[in-house]
């Protein structure tokens, strides 16, 4: 099981939808989170994309020297950048990080953001443009000299002089719930991502994607994007979930839902449908809570519970075929530690070898009464 964390390039804090307890996006803070994720044994970190975020490529580049093993899942945006420029960025980052780049293919789901970036395409046209983009992008990264003329993309003698470390290219991740998205994924990507829908909905997606990929002679891996609110007891976890949205009022929720309604993203529609903008029935599946989606776009659900319960829910998704979990929690620095300490001992994850013990109290704990070594305990 591969467990990733999240770098909040659009702000962080203890509550949603308010400045109370908020934290500024600074290089130091993002490096703190990245170092924590790296030290704790998370396999990678997702960096969000869009106009509400700091640029993912610039931020991820700044985190390379702050980390040793952590991989970075960074978005390419077909339509906003050319496939050859994206290939050069990909190759450079992959070399400078020694093969620690993963690519998140994002077509975009907010038409107003797309037109602000100069993209005047319909939903299905964006996917058609992405299809052409990836035809060129993948071939160039694999070392081909490419001539291509499509409806949306045209290149002559496109090539890459400096290849990436990972061959034929860094793995491609992609999420989308529409017919056009599923067709695109079955043709091009390595790992199909879903947002945190109830298990029965995730099962249906996986089965559909397996069928489509098999028809093309391909196989896919699968991942899921979730928030987690895990505590030592179930009651404490639900208290933390309710606390996270305690500053939200009906006006803020309505404003957010009205904004999401303009999106042409099928995935966003499915997220919003889980709660319908109401806060009185947010547990949409056992321990799956849709409260985050009241005001946050994209991934809007969290697994809530004590450590064994949350780990069990993750194993249920794994049984469906999910091998990668991209998690987050508010605030992201503290929750990176909490999730790792409570969940990793209960999950089949590989963790970095522990540093040599040079202190008799071990890596954690302090002397009792300044004289007695504490008892060694396990989180599991």
Image (spheres, rainbow, N blue to C red):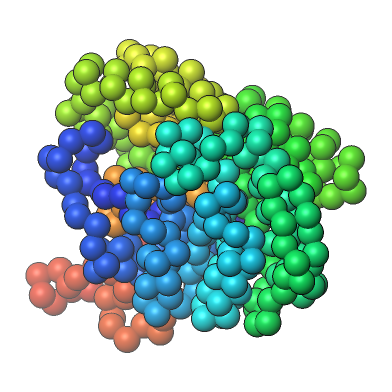
Q: Nearer the viewer, residue 318 or 255?
A: 255
- Is 211 rendered above or below residue 4? above
Residue 20 location (% of width, % of height)? 13, 40
Compared to residue 254, the image places residue 3 above or below, namely: below
- Residue 368 is left or right of residue 266, and the answer is left
85 lies left or right of 361: right
Position of residue 249 measured from the top left corner of the image (x, y, whole percent)? 19, 20
Q: Residue at x 27, y 75 (%)?
A: 361
Which residue is more in the foreground, 45 or 173? Answer: 173
Residue 36 visible: no
Quarter occupied by residue 337:
bottom left
Residue displayed at 83% across by 36% down: 211
Residue 59 point in image, percent of width and height: 38, 65
- Residue 255 vs residue 372: left or right? right
Residue at x 33%, y 42% (from the top left corner): 231
Residue sitting farthest toward the left: 369
**Left or right, 194 with reference to 244:** right
Residue 377 image-quadrant placement: bottom left
Asked if 248 appears above or below 139 in the picture, the reply is above
Q: Position of residue 270 (x, y in %)?
A: 53, 24
Residue nearest the viewer, comparing 109 with 311: 109
Image: 335 above or below 371 = above
């Amino acid at each position: 099981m591969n467990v990733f964390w999240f770098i909040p390039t659009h702000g962080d804090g203890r509550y949603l939808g308010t400045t109370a307890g908020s934290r500024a996006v600074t290089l130091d803070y993002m490096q703190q989170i990245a170092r924590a994720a790296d030290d704790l044994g998370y396999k990678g970190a997702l960096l969000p994309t869009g106009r509400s975020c700091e640029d993912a490529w610039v931020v991820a580049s700044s985190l390379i020297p702050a980390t040793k093993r952590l991989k970075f899942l960074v978005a390419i945006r077909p339509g906003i950048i050319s496939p050859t420029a994206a290939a050069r960025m990909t190759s450079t980052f992959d070399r400078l990080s020694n093969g620690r780049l993963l690519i998140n293919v994002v077509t975009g789901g907010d038409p107003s953001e797309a037109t602000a970036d100069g993209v005047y395409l319909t939903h299905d046209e964006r996917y058609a443009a992405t299809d052409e983009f990836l035809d060129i992008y993948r071939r160039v990264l694999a070392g081909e000299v490419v001539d291509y003329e499509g409806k949306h993309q045209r290149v002559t003698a496109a090539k890459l002089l400096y290849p990436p470390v990972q061959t034929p290219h860094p793995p491609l991740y992609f999420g989308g719930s529409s017919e056009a998205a599923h067709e695109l994924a079955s043709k091009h990507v390595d790992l199909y991502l879903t947002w945190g829908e109830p298990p029965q909905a995730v099962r249906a997606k996986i089965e559909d994607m397996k069928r489509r990929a098999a028809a093309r002679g391909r196989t896919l891996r699968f991942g899921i994007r979730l928030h987690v609110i895990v505590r030592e007891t179930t009651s404490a976890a639900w208290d933390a979930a309710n606390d996270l949205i305690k500053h939200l009022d009906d006006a803020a929720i309505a404003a957010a839902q009205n904004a999401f309604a303009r999106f042409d993203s099928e995935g966003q529609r499915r997220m919003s449908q889980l709660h319908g903008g109401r806060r009185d029935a947010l547990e949409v599946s056992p321990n799956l809570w849709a409260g985050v989606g009241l005001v946050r776009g994209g991934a809007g659900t969290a697994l809530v519970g004590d450590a064994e319960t949350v780990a069990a829910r993750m194993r249920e998704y794994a049984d469906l075929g999910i091998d990668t979990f991209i998690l987050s929690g508010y605030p992201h620095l503290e929750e990176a530690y909490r999730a790792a300490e409570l969940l990793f001992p209960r999950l089949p994850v590989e963790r970095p070898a522990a540093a040599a013990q040079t202190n008799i109290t071990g890596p954690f704990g302090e002397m009792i009464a300044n004289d007695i070594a504490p008892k060694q305990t396990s989180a599991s």
